[in-house]
Image (cartoon, rainbow, N blue to C red):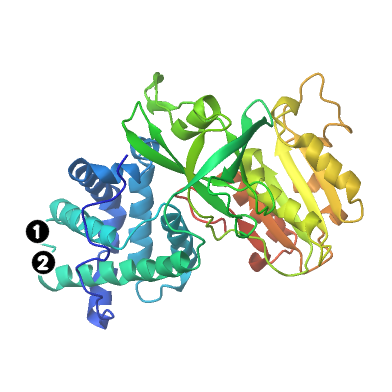
């Protein structure tokens, strides 16, 4: 299926001069408009842009469009940008996260011009041509392109540091069932060339053609193992359908288009296209202790960190594995993590929570605590609170991560030692 868009490799709009104080003031003045109409603007933008430039549908998640998550994320980004136009420092972590996401699906500079056209048209239609004119219109164009080039420049740096740009063919070497919901896929490069090291916690993009949609879709999956020059491993949860009509739960969509295709139709020896690893949620390079806290499928990037730490030859950083799952049938890598802890008793500590154990799940053998993950039930040595350099990595549903951040800060952990993986439109927990 075609991936190229009929545009040049760079936008025809030249790089803007820095915004003037007057322009920044004008952009600050439209914050109330973006608060009230931001989602309406971005929803209209995506509707028209994807209808008139259908090849772009290969880049955007159809399920996120159906659920309104993509317009919501862009509206949130525009509001944050306008609100911090005088000092962009608070939004730079968000910019970094999105730049990595863009690089993972090979966004090119010319595509920013497409967005500029449809976003500006949507603003004019929603707000009114009698308002968006003159100095305000010029300020908006300047604001857009100043932000666009922050992304373009950062993405260029990411591409320059990547082992390849675009899509590379891999062979499915094996599939391994990890639980009733999760399947691991081992991918070997088709060209046989060794894979360059990635940073533990990063993800790859997988793209597949979705026959029922008639388009290519891509999804990002965390690498779930330490670096190996011969293969990548991802561990994918099969996602169920959700209501497309909130008043009628019988109308289901398939938000897990790619996860279901991978589970059901991607077989060993098949060819699949992958992108180079990206992502800013990565294990730090210090010698400090590490605590890995996960819920559900959030374990995947943390598993890459765990494996990297126990396999490292030059350091033996202490690490704690604190995991929340529902029960034994949904407990991925149970035996593996237990074996790691047995093999490295002086380095690795574990605490496992089951929120809804089954009859054959044995406390003290299969899990430690019957409850949702509660830090009050984790002993102080496992939380490693006495070392004020300990780094905490949290991954799971948004509310879980927010709860963990709040609980750790209440125990005296400084924010700069807290790290979270965020895939959706939500902000990093504070």
Residue tagged 1: 129
Categorize mark 2 by other alpha carbons within 10 Å: few (<14), some (14-19), many (20+). Answer: few
Image quarter (top left, top right, bottom left or bottom right) of the C terminus: bottom right
- State the residue in front, 410 or 331: 331
Image location of residue 151, percent across then percent down: 38, 66
Residue 67 in which image quadrant: top left
Task: Name which residue lies at 71% across and 39% down.
Answer: 324
Q: Quadrant of the N terminus?
A: top left
> Counting other residues with Cα less than 10 Å from the Cα at mark 1, is it few (<14), some (14-19), or many (20 or more)?
few
Q: Element at badge 1?
A: loop
Res 373 seen here: no
Tag of residue 210: none
Query: Position of 361 compared to 55: left or right?
Result: right
Seen from the viewer's position, the closer of residues 22 and 226 is 226
Q: Secondary structure at mark 2?
A: loop
- In x, y percent, where is residue 357? 76, 26
Q: Position of residue 388 (x, y in %)?
A: 78, 69
Q: Is residue 314 visible?
A: yes
Residue 217, compared with residue 109, is above or below; it is above
Which label sits on residue 133?
Answer: 2
Residue nearest the observer in this picture, 424 or 8: 8
**Going by the image, does 224 lie left or right of 317?**
left
Describe residue 83's horizontal placement relative to residue 238 as left or right.
Answer: left
Q: Residue at x 60, y 51 (%)?
A: 402
Q: Position of residue 257 (x, y in %)?
A: 44, 31
The answer to whether mark 1 and mark 2 are in CB contact below 8 A is yes
Check the image and report above or below for 38 versus 243.
Answer: below
Q: Quadrant of residue 363?
A: top right
**C-alpha distance separating marks 1 and 2:** 6 Å
Label tally:
2
């Amino acid at each position: 299926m075609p991936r190229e868009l009929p545009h040049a490799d760079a936008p025809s709009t030249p790089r803007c001069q820095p915004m003037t104080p007057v322009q920044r003031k004008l952009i600050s003045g439209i914050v109330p408009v973006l608060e009230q109409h931001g989602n309406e603007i971005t929803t209209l933008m995506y509707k028209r842009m994807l209808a008139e430039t259908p090849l772009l549908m290969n880049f955007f998640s159809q399920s996120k469009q159906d659920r309104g998550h993509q317009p919501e994320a862009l509206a949130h980004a525009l509001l944050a940008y306008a609100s911090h136009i005088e000092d962009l420092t608070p939004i730079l972590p968000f910019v970094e996260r999105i730049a990595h996401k863009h690089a993972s699906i090979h966004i090119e500079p010319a595509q920013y011009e497409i967005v500029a056209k449809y976003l500006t048209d949507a603003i004019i239609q929603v707000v009114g041509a009698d308002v968006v004119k003159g100095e305000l219109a010029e300020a908006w164009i300047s604001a857009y392109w100043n932000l666009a080039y922050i992304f373009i420049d950062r993405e260029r740096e990411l591409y320059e540091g990547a082992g390849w740009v675009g899509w590379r063919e891999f062979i499915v070497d094996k599939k391994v069932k990890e639980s009733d919901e999760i399947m691991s896929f081992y991918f070997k490069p088709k060209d046989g060339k060794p894979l360059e090291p990635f940073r533990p916690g990063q993800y790859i993009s997988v793209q597949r053609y979705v026959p029922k949609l008639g388009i290519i879709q891509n999804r990002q999956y965390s690498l779930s193992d330490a670096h190996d020059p011969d293969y990548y491993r991802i561990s994918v949860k099969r996602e169920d359908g959700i209501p497309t009509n909130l008043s009628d739960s019988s109308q289901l969509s398939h938000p897990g288009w790619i996860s279901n295709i991978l589970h059901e139709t991607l077989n060993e020896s098949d060819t699949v296209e992958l992108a180079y690893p990206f992502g800013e949620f990565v294990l730090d390079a210090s010698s400090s202790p590490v605590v890995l806290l996960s819920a559900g499928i959030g374990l995947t990037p943390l598993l890459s960190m765990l494996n990297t730490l126990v396999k490292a030859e030059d350091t033996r950083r202490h690490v704690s594995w604190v995991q929340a799952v529902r029960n034994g049938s949904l407990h991925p890598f149970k035996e593996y993590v237990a074996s790691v802890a047995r093999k490295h008793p002086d380095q690795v500590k574990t605490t496992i929570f089951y929120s809804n154990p089954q009859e054959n799940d044995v406390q003290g053998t299969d899990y430690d605590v019957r409850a949702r993950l509660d830090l009050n039930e984790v002993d102080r040595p496992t939380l490693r609170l006495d070392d004020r350099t300990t780094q905490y990595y949290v991954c799971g549903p948004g509310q879980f991560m927010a709860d963990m951040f709040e609980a750790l800060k209440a125990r005296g952990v400084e924010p700069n030692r807290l790290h979270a993986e965020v895939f959706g439109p939500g902000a990093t927990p504070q």
